[in-house]
Amino acid sequence: MATTLTNDTAFSARFWDKTAKKYAASPIRNQEAYEKTLERTIENLGPEDQVLELGCGTGSTALLLNGKVKSYLATDFAPGMISIAKEKLAAEEAEGKTHEGLGFLAADAFDDRVRLSSAEADGYDAILAFNFFHLVENPEELLARVRGLLKPGGLYISKTVCLKKRAWLFGPLIKVMQLFGKAPHVNMLSFHSLEQSIRDAGFEIIETGTYPAPYSRFVVARKV
């Protein structure tokens, strides 16, 4: 059963839905940082892992990572993003590339369809969320949900934009853009507040990095 979106979440979904084509056409801003994020993520995954990605966008990262694990469900609450991701998947399969175990689903983290059945496992081995956590309206609820979806000892691997130090600049600008429907919800986080919220949700942080500096915090946390 799918969940009902709140007004704020529904606005964000519409925003990202409308932005999907432009987002898909945008180049990666920092290729070196992106590759470092992939490297560290792969290092923490195993070939038998069952993985869930939240906020997968148009699926580029899922297409690169799914061959490293047993199964990979990539989700985004914006149907436009998932539509483009499925187009990418079909194009790669038409070229002869195989993506066994990869699925794309238009859903948020609270949708019942993202949960593994008890016959499959007692939870995901890893949940990924790249450039996502600072955009959610209910961060504490999201982290609780992530923890509930993970198996004991499972990993939450994320990269989050933290703009707290420049909130004086970005905060007013984002609010003006939001008035005109040009920006989604944004949480002004610091590295400390981000990591503390992860710990408070019942995780042990086992790795951190900043890719790219100075704003994007990479965190690997284990469910305890």
Image: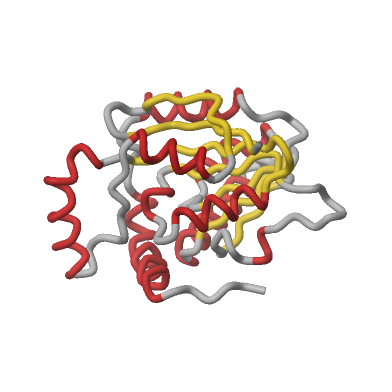
Quadrant (top left/top right/bottom left/bottom right) for the N terminus: bottom right
Tell me where residue 10 sits by quadrant: bottom left
69 or 3, which is in the foreground?
A: 3
66 or 221, which is in the foreground?
A: 221
Q: Where's residue 78, x and y in %?
A: 46, 64
Q: Residue at x 19, y 56 (%)?
A: 174
16 or 147, which is in the foreground?
A: 147
- Give the left or right position of residue 174, taking residue 35 as reference: left
In the image, farthest residue toward the front:
200
Q: Where's residue 62, x and y in %?
A: 57, 43
* Up-down relation of residue 109 to residue 200 (above or below): below
Image color mode? secondary structure
Q: Where's residue 55, x and y in %?
A: 49, 53
Q: Residue at x 70, y 39 (%)?
A: 125
In the image, farthest residue toward the right:
119
- Give the left or right position of residue 181, taking residue 115 as reference: left
- Give the left or right position of residue 101, taking residue 134 as reference: right
Q: How many marks?
A: 0
Quadrant (top left/top right/bottom left/bottom right) for the C terminus: top right
Q: Residue at x 51, y 38 (%)?
A: 199
Q: Residue at x 57, y 47 (%)?
A: 53
* Up-down relation of residue 199 to residue 115 (above or below): above
* Up-down relation of residue 215 to residue 128 (above or below): above
Q: Where's residue 120, x and y in %?
A: 83, 51
158 or 206, which is in the foreground?
A: 206
* Up-down relation of residue 25 to residue 164 (above or below): below
